[in-house]
Image (cartoon, rainbow, N blue to C red):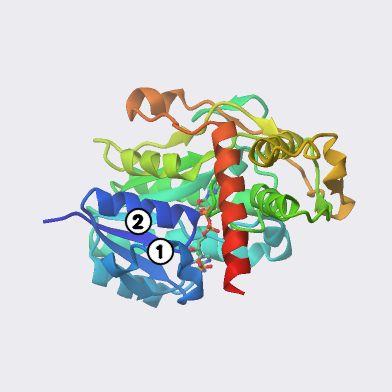
């Protein structure tokens, strides 16, 4: 019998990569969706192999229906209100989805099928400005309603684990891909780069160019998510590359890729020729540097990343250039 997995957030970046990975491993995959088909763009290739069920993390009845339909061995709770500025505008809703949603799932799993394993998408945003490389013992100090909601959910995992449920929180540092949400800074930059490659010189407005993040490739990170759920005993793991780069570094790397692709020396610094700082986009309670110490994951679950910073930027720029070309030829 194939193992059965229920994925919330299956239409998103991580959900779509995880669904591909689990199907490759022979799983029967169930996905919770809020609507279709626009939100399913990353699932087109595999949609016929997935059982979809409608639901929302705020709605217990829909979650119970999805759970009973999937009767899962493993639940991957990837759905969330993910955008930090939105969490400042709608903190209560963010908590309802990000912490309330997990609490509903944990309650259903504990009541209906307590041998179900539950994965929670925890986040490096729980560390705030703790400073230095962060590992599983670094104190949490979230700096936004998003980070606080993720920390509440992370603690819920630990509490249910204490009551015998297999529940793990994967503390993932930033991970990107061509499927990253367009509102996120890396994707904003690579989408702008596609326009620059076409000759458009509109400057991109960004917030703090000096903020540093540990950026990895989402396709690598979903392997870690799955591995964490296969351990004999449930435990939380930090996942990241161990290197951090600033937003300015990201823009510089993008220009280098454009220079290599087009041979056009116009794609050279200073980056202010292509981007400008908009004070309105500088985050309240900015986190200055987030960097992972993922040694435990390397040692215990045997995970390491395969795509480095340069490879990631190149992959994203090339994908956005292709997407823009396809959109132009379809118009
Ligand atoms: P994403 O691409 O924005 O996907 C978010 C998913 O959540 C979408 O499928 C969305 O569905 C779904 N969703 C949102 N609100 C929902 C609700 N009320 N009920 C049901 N589904 C809902 O995010 P991602 O980058 O893949 O991230 C996956 C998870 O990892 C999130 O929990 C995020 O907080 C966490 N995380 C991400 C990172 C990162 O760097 N990417 C780092 C640490 C943790 P629709 O398509 O219907 O909108």
How far across and how far down the image is residue 164, in percent? 28, 46
Quadrant of the frame with the N terminus: bottom left
Whether residue 129 is visible, yes or no, is no
Relative vertical location of residue 329 with respect to residue 216 in this rendering, above or below: below
Please identify the residue farthest to the left as the structure is shown: 1
Classify mark 1: residues with Cα within 10 Å, few (<14), some (14-19) or many (20+). many
How far across and how far down the image is residue 282, in percent? 82, 48
How far across and how far down the image is residue 77, in percent? 41, 56
How far across and how far down the image is residue 326, in percent? 56, 64
Residue nearest the observer in this picture, 73 or 246: 246
Say whether residue 280 is left or right of residue 185.
right
Numbered disc in front, either 1 or 2: 1
Residue at the spot 77% in from the left edge and 54% down from the top edge: 199
Relative vertical location of residue 121 with respect to residue 33 in this rendering, above or below: above
Q: In which quarter of the image is residue 16?
A: bottom left
Quickly name the residue at label 2: 19
* Secondary-structure class at tag 1: helix
Residue at the spot 40% in from the left edge and 45% down from the top edge: 222
Classify mark 2: residues with Cα within 10 Å, few (<14), some (14-19) or many (20+). many
Residue at the spot 60% in from the left edge and 26% down from the top edge: 243
Is the C-beta separation of discs 1 and 2 under 8 Å?
A: yes
Q: In which quarter of the image is residue 108?
A: bottom left
Quickly name the residue at label 1: 43
Say whether residue 195 is left or right of residue 148.
right
Q: Which mark is residue 177?
A: none
Q: Earlier in the sequence, mark 1 or mark 2?
A: 2
Quadrant of the frame with the C terminus: bottom right
Q: Alpha carbon of mark 1 to alpha carbon of mark 2: how far?
A: 8 Å
* Secondary-structure class at tag 2: helix
């Amino acid at each position: 019998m194939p193992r059965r997995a229920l994925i919330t957030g299956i239409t998103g970046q991580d959900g779509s990569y995880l669904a591909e990975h689990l199907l490759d491993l022979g799983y029967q995959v169930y996905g919770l969706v809020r609507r279709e088909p626009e939100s399913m763009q990353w699932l087109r290739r595999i949609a016929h192999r997935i059982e979809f069920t409608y639901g929302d993390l705020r709605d217990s009845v829909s979650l119970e229906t999805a759970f009973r339909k999937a009767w899962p061995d493993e639940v991957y709770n990837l759905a969330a209100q993910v955008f930090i500025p939105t969490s400042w505008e709608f903190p209560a809703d963010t908590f309802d989805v990000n912490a309330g949603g997990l609490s509903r799932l944990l309650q259903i799993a504990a009541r209906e099928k307590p041998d179900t394993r539950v994965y929670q998408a925890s986040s490096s945003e729980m560390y705030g400005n703790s400073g230095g490389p962060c590992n599983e013992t670094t104190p949490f100090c979230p700096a936004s309603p998003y980070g606080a909601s993720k920390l509440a959910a992370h603690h819920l995992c630990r509490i249910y684990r204490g009551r015998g449920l297999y529940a793990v929180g994967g503390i993932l540092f930033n991970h990107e891909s061509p499927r990253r949400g367009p509102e996120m800074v890396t994707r904003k930059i690579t989408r702008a780069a596609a326009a620059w490659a076409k000759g458009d010189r509109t400057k991109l407005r960004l917030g703090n160019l000096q903020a540093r993040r540990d950026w990895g490739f989402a396709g690598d990170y979903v392997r870690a998510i799955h591995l964490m759920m296969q351990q004999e005993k449930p435990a939380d793991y930090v996942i990241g590359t161990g290197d951090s780069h600033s937003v300015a570094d990201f823009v510089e790397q993008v220009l280098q890729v454009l220079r290599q692709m087009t041979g056009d020396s116009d794609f050279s610094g200073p980056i202010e020729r292509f981007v400008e700082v908009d004070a309105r986009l500088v985050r309240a309670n900015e986190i200055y540097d987030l960097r992972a110490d993922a040694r435990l994951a390397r040692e215990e679950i045997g995970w390491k990343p395969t795509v480095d910073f340069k490879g990631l930027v190149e992959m994203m720029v090339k994908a956005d250039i292709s997407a823009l070309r396809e959109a132009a030829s379809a118009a």
